[in-house]
Image: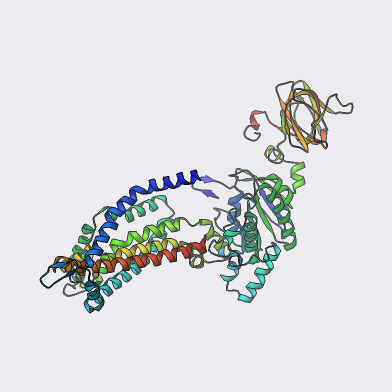
Amino acid sequence: MRAAARRRLTAWALLAPALVLLVGVFVVPSLDLLRLSLAWTDPGRTIHSDFSLANYRNFTTSAHFHRLLWGSVKLTLWVTAGCLLLGYPAAWYMVHARRRVARTVLYAIVVSPLLISVIVRTFGWVVLLANNGVVNWALTVTGAVDKPVRMLGTFGSVTVASIHVLLPFMILPIASGLQDIDPTLARAAQNLGATPAQTFWRVTLPLSMPGVLAGTALVIALGLGLFITPLLVAGPLQPLLALGIYYVTLNQLDFPLGAALSFVLLIFALLVLAAAARALSAVNRSAV
Amino acid sequence: MAYGDTVVLHDVDLDVAKGEFLSLLGPSGCGKTTTLNIVAGFLTPLRGTVSLGGRIVTDVPPYRRHAGMVFQSYALFPHMNVFDNVAFGLRVRGTPAAVIAKKVAEVLALVQLQGFAQRPVRALSGGQQQRVAIARALAIDPLVLLMDEPLSNLDAQLRRQMRVELRRLQQQVGITTIFVTHDQEEALTLSDRLVVMNAGRIEQAGTPVELYRRPRTPFVAQFLGHPNFLFGEVVEHGADHVTVRLGADVVRARAEVALERGAPVAVVLRPSSARLSRERPPDAVNAVSGRIGYTVYLGTSAEYEVRLGHAAALRAVEQISTGIPSFRDGEDVVVSWSADDTLVFPGTEASFRGVVA
């Protein structure tokens, strides 16, 4: 009994630093944000802190905000799909490349962007996609188009740049999931008559699902909150909830409404994570 | 066969008869698993051919070879239950569901796992996983069953039990089997034919009795039963025997090759062929005196290390029905044996280094 008590104490002691940090910089500000979201702003921009659901009512009844939320959801779906399609093969090759050097180099290529600021990486896309940018230059020089195509500011450019920014968060969990699969299983499948394609669909892919789900959850959560990348590539008027929050907070100075919209987005992201966690534990239960 | 610049297999020429149980026996790194992987198609030999059921399959990918393999780690698919594991090979061939159900039930009955079809494989014991792995390999009616140290992950008692069962199963199904092991006891009990491999070469192939009774090389002799190697030189060579001086003693041994007088040789004597007594037996052809160094007590038998006069030592095993060893450490004894129970290999003591542990 005393040993159990001591073990519990040790557990708390080990968790304490992280807990203090989490409570201090996430839970407390979030609660403050929640309190702020329940205040209201009059047309003269004075904030009244008496309890009101006006901001949430505003969100649920405003077609504009629905459009912004749908824009965020649509972008996240495209980005997640893009990251899955590009990330899975890359992760597979990263784990299965014959040569050790190839694996190390690939790993470095995947991880190195994380060492560079998102702003710098996004500016790269601005340079590439601008009307006088590299891509348009190449297209005009080769005669593929007569005059530059507008790419910056489009939904497509936001999607492409966001996929680039979030791709490592898809590749790394999938690669670590693939790494955990016993290579003998693929041999066993082939020995039993499964072609390489059958081996992939029936053995490798199902067993890599924990990694796929983890990567998907990460990319969805980060995708819903994407802010800098769409702002730089497409400007503040792109229909995305994160940009809408920025606009009402900093241009309209309606802090309570901004707080309420932030909360909507946070709850959305938490729901996605909860769903992913549920799916993950179901997959793990069937696999383990 | 080579990895990089390291040649791991040289000129391995093997023929396995239909229905035969063949074991590849050797220490780790001898090339036995490589040989198995070449047959399964996971590795391609630099030279030579592999044929299965009369068809040359050297360039055929593993999934079209029809060889069933039982892996050392069993390699069961963790995301499937027992039924789906066993049905896997049939499903990828597009076999109708009704045929699959019948075949799976049949092979599960064969390995005595009726009623386990719906269990997740992680919920099974090591022995049960082993049976599923065998059933899964048999379900595709393979041309040959390949087993890579399948018993090495089981505890000693289960291993003995599975050994008997494996033999029964193989004879019942009548399937050609190649079995890889480093355990001489396993190889001796299971095999119709035994191939001892060393450093990528076949040392000797034959029935278990042939190899045990008449090992052709010191390596085979050493690997099957860890006999004593007593070093001396030839005094006289007869028609089928040779007289050898071992320090102060002169002994007679069976010899099949002609040896010159004075040639250095090793006389090989199994511990179980050496008899111990307090007095020199009157009828003994070979008898040397020594003193018991230490005893390894095994219950039904005792193994003594006997120090001989000339700095050499030999091990002798006594079967003891009473459970009490007849000799004590430090006791003076006479070790005697029949010339028929010995073998002679030419070579100096130094030349046997690396073979004789």
Q: Nearer the viewer, residue A269 or B205?
A: A269
Residue, far left: A44
Quarter-wise, where is residue B185 in the image? top right
Query: Residue B2 in the image: x percent, y percent?
Result: 53, 49
Q: Nearer the viewer, residue A287 or A5?
A: A5
Quarter-wise, where is residue A150 in the image? bottom left
From the viewer's perspective, tell me whether residue A205 is left or right of residue B288: left
* Protein image colouring: rainbow
Residue, far front: A50
At horizontal 29% and vertical 63% (from top left) the residue drawn is A164
Q: Is residue A83 above or below residue B147?
A: below
Where is the C terminus of chain B found, in terms of image quarters?
A: top right
Question: Count the marks: how many?
Answer: 0
Q: Nearer the viewer, residue A145 or A66?
A: A66
Res. A130 visible in picture: no
Query: Residue A285 in the image: x percent, y percent?
Result: 50, 62
Residue, far right: B282
At horizontal 58% and vertical 71% (from top left) the residue drawn is B91
Query: Residue B240 in the image: x percent, y percent?
Result: 82, 35
Quarter-wise, where is residue A140 in the image? bottom left
Query: Residue B247 in the image: x percent, y percent?
Result: 74, 22
At horizontal 83% and vertical 24% (from top left) the residue drawn is B278
Res. B260 visible in picture: yes
From the viewer's perspective, tell me whether residue A69 is left or right of residue A174: left
Q: Nearer the viewer, residue B12 or B147?
A: B147
